[in-house]
Amino acid sequence: MPSVTPPRSDPRMAALDAWLASLAPVHQLEIDTLQAASSDASFRRYFRLRAGKRTVVVMDAPPPHEDCRPFVHVARLLSDAGINVPDILAQDIRQGFLLLSDLGPRTYYQAIQAGLDDAALQRAYRDALGSLVRMQQAATTGLPAYDEARLLEELALFPEWYAGRHCKAELDADERNVLRDAFRLLARDNAAQPAVFVHRDFHSPNLMLCDRDEYGPNPGVIDFQDALRGPLTYDLASLVMDARTTWEEPRQLDWAIRYWEAARAAGLPVPADFADLHRAYEWMGLQRNLRILGVFARLSHRDGKHHYLDHMPRVNAYVRQVAGRYAVFGRLLRLLDRLDNRQVSVGYTF
């Protein structure tokens, strides 16, 4: 997003200014250069400012809505695994402030939107796949389990916020059973995968396109504070079925095969047959994208963040890609047709 000067009428800005002033001599902070850098779907927001010959980033995570401690903990786990994450230069957990090293001004998403050429895109994503393999070897000490119960709980967002609030549909008993059966199948299958470090949003908005000389190895990885210990294919599904950037199936497959080869070489517990991995990450992607439809609907209808609706057609297409491939999700696909007000035709499959 464009950099703008944050309004000093903001009640947290006085506290942030005072904190930065206390750090200014040690870190050479030029407080008058403070500019908004980005915000996300939570209460967190980020600022950038000059610090001598470099720039640094400030995280504002206002208590009681946010807690900086998971960020600090996960940053250490990832750094120890060789992942390029921000260094924590200073912290005030009580106030919810972190001073971080800067990983650069451009995310993968921003670079893609600006017209990143295909050769550079391929290099960037090969770097990301290598980072994913290293990340999945990170320690999971202290991370909550991304287990069947949690996976199932997250899917409750779909009937409440997507079907009910966004599509204005009243589900009958049979339709509720269709969702229940599909959700239970997905949660059980995904939870049975080998458990590794899971970022949860390993996709283009959270990968920084880094110049090694200035910002370290590509990619820089951000927004990892919600990490869990969970299904092996979760972050692969996040990357190749990106909620913000459309990737067609040939590209999905190319990157997934490259990941599979690198993961096998690294000794990660991937299936011996790529076809099994393909099925596993597609089902994982179906669970993730059904949840995301609910999340985006909630962000719009509850929080007024309507720009998330722009990404719904893409996420819906990923859902249909998988639901349409596997007969076990046939009833789910017909329900999606009704929710999307599509004309359902009678046909035959052989």
Image (cartoon, rainbow, N blue to C red):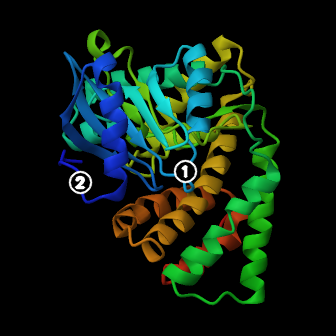
Crowd rating for badge 1 (residues with CA inside 10 Å; few <14, some 14–19, many 20+): some
Q: Nearer the viewer, residue 36 or 314?
A: 36
Residue 102 in the image: state x and y as whole percent: 33, 26
Q: Is residue 66 left or right of residue 110?
A: right
Where is residue 266, by image quadrant? top right
Q: Amino acid at mark 1?
A: Glu
Crowd rating for badge 2 (residues with CA inside 10 Å; few <14, some 14–19, many 20+): few
Residue 236 in the image: state x and y as whole percent: 57, 36
Q: With respect to residue 193, does 219 lie above or below?
A: above
Q: With respect to residue 239, does 53 lie above or below?
A: above
Where is residue 187, by image quadrant? bottom right
Where disc 2 sits, the SS reads: loop
Q: Amino acid at mark 2?
A: Arg
| Circle 2 residue | 8
Q: Nearer the viewer, residue 73 or 189?
A: 73
Q: Nearer the viewer, residue 36 or 293?
A: 36
Q: Residue at x 41, y 39 (%)?
A: 59
Q: Which mark is residue 66?
A: 1
Q: Nearer the viewer, residue 61 or 124?
A: 61
Q: Residue at x 39, y 63 (%)?
A: 308
Q: Residue at x 78, y 71 (%)?
A: 180
